[in-house]
Image: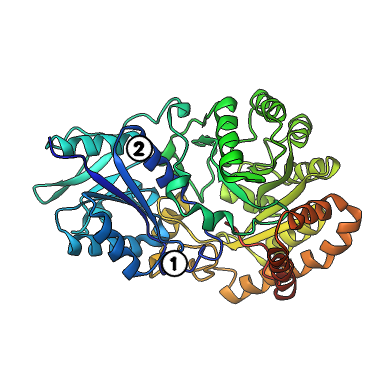
């Protein structure tokens, strides 16, 4: 057995302009790091969201001298992952380079065709990464190690998959302390959340079947939804509250609001903890109910983000979204009754979109009157049915990995709409939204109250930034950027 390995985990965000304005903590590699530390492995994280120059990375390699480097890879940052891998091998060709994340999960051959990458992890990586390190330490082959792909005799070998982690409570809390957490926590949170705020993950897996995110989501985390226990989540929140002095948190996974008994237990435990934190979460419109919202409101929930996507039932059906216009209206009406702020995420330009369906979407936005609005333009992500369909129909118009983002209108060759049409409709939708937002502060003062609460939680200089940013959005009609 060799001496203890030193592992470096890298989030390669340098040069990645999309998302860099408001980068979220890379909780995926923070979970990996925590797992390695629990198993007495030496680990360090280099997050390029802030220290993102090549010189910075060279210095980290030279100072830390890792034996293994793990790189988080999304479709949008594949080229940057390749650059990082090249720098690593130039520094020391004996360093084992491991990639993981969505892109390596469904494109292991593509990743391993790059000579600077040694192993691709498919699906959940916490236990798999431990097993990889154990194999390296003991000079054992990877041939029977599940959830990985690697090169054997110059050929890519893809091993079999294992079942997703059954009990998520077995995982340690993410190693926030190894990230540049002070930089993240100093960023103003998106309204109406008080600062400092932080993201948490409460579950994995999705039984729903939207064309724009399946089957890659299932390949990553499985079909069945697995949730951490409410006690486990509250235990993490307590640590975050007292270690980092957070005033709010956001539950970023999409299926938190699904089981009524689960929601009731979580909220009861949160109330009993007397942490007095504000929070928000994502939800589908067809999993919400008055009873759930009542409990959530009592426990400090002040905002919910809904994936509305479209105001056209025809478009929702084409997306295989599994929701109805009636359910959308009901969800927003319930939130207004209970004075919970809402954010509507809209997806314009899905194949089959027409000017008529875009008009329906704008009319729906005006009717449901969300307090926040975020409009993206459909871009097919690799590993999804939408991507495969567009590729089979020769309608993909993407020439670089960076174009896999929610603001690239030319990604699909559309039959009924041009890129200019989509940009114009997005501006029109934001214009209609901002026409009513300030009058609605009077009609629904809870949103203004929440925003003022947030501003009050910040130093005066930061509050000025918030107001300036909101006014710039109002003038430019850009809306709330998705995270």
The quarter holding residue 275 reads top right
Position of residue 442 measured from the top left corner of the image (x, y, whole percent)? 91, 57
Mark 2 secondary-structure assignment: helix
> Which quadrant is home to the N terminus?
top left
Position of residue 106 measured from the top left corner of the image (x, y, whole percent)? 34, 48
The quarter holding residue 335 reads top right
Judge from the rendering whether residue 260 lies leftward or rightward of residue 184; answer left or right: right
Judge from the rendering whether residue 217 lies leftward or rightward of residue 361; answer left or right: left
Q: Nearer the viewer, residue 168 or 388?
A: 168
* Dot label at residue 16: 1
* Dot label at residue 37: 2
Q: CA distance from mark 1 to mark 2?
A: 29 Å
> Which quadrant is home to the C terminus?
bottom right
**Residue at 19%, 32% in the rendered image:** 144
Disc 2 packing (10 Å; few <14; some 14–19; many ≥20): some
Mark 1 or 2: in front is 2
User: CB under 8 Å between callouts 1 and 2?
Assistant: no
Mark 1 secondary-structure assignment: loop
Q: Check the image and name the residue furthest to the right.
A: 443
Judge from the rendering whether residue 153 lies leftward or rightward of residue 48; answer left or right: left
**Residue at 29%, 64% in the rendered image:** 59
């Amino acid at each position: 057995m060799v001496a203890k390995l030193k592992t470096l985990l890298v989030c390669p965000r340098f040069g990645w302009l999309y998302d860099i304005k408001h980068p979220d903590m890379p909780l995926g590699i923070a979970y990996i790091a925590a797992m390695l530390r629990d198993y007495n492995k030496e680990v360090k994280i280099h997050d390029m969201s802030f220290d993102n120059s090549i010189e910075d990375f060279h210095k980290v390699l030279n100072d830390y001298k890792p034996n293994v480097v793990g790189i988080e890879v999304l479709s949008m940052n594949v080229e940057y992952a390749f650059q990082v891998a090249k720098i690593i091998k130039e520094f020391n060709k004996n360093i084992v380079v491991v990639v993981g994340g969505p892109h390596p999960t469904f494109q292991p051959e593509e990743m391993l065709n790059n000579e600077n990458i040694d192993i691709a992890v498919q699906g959940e990586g916490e236990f798999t990464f431990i097993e990889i390190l154990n194999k390296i330490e003991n000079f054992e082959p990877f041939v029977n190690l599940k959830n990985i792909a690697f090169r054997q005799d110059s050929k890519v070998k893809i091993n079999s998959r294992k079942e997703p982690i059954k009990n998520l409570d077995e995982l340690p809390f993410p190693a926030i302390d190894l990230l540049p957490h002070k930089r993240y926590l100093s960023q103003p949170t998106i309204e109406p959340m008080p600062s400092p705020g932080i993201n948490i993950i409460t579950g994995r897996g999705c039984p729903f079947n939207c064309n724009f995110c399946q089957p890659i989501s299932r390949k990553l985390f499985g079909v069945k939804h697995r949730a951490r226990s409410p006690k486990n989540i509250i235990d993490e929140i307590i640590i975050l509250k007292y270690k980092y002095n957070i005033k709010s948190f956001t539950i970023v996974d999409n299926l938190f609001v699904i089981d009524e008994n689960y929601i009731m237990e979580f909220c009861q435990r949160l109330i009993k903890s007397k942490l007095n934190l504000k929070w928000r979460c994502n939800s589908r419109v067809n999993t919400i109910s008055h009873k759930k919202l009542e409990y959530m409101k009592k426990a400090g929930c002040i905002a919910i983000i809904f994936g509305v996507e479209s105001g056209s039932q025809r478009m929702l059906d084409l997306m295989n979204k599994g929701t109805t216009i009636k359910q959308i209206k009901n969800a927003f009406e319930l939130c207004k009754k209970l004075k919970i702020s809402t954010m509507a995420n809209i997806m314009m330009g899905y194949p089959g979109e027409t000017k008529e369906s875009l008009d329906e979407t704008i009319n729906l936005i005006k009717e449901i009157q969300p307090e926040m609005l975020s409009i993206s333009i459909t871009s097919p992500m690799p590993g999804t049915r939408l991507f495969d369909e567009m590729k089979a129909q020769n309608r993909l118009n993407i020439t670089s990995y960076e174009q896999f983002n929610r603001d690239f209108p030319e990604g699909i060759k559309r039959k009924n709409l041009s890129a200019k049409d989509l940009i114009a409709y997005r501006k029109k939708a934001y214009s209609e939204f901002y026409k009513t937002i300030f009058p609605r502060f009077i009609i629904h003062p809870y949103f203004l109250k929440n925003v003022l609460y947030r501003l009050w939680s910040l130093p005066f200089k930061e509050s000025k930034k918030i107001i300036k940013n909101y006014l710039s959005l109002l003038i430019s009609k850009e809306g709330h950027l998705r995270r």
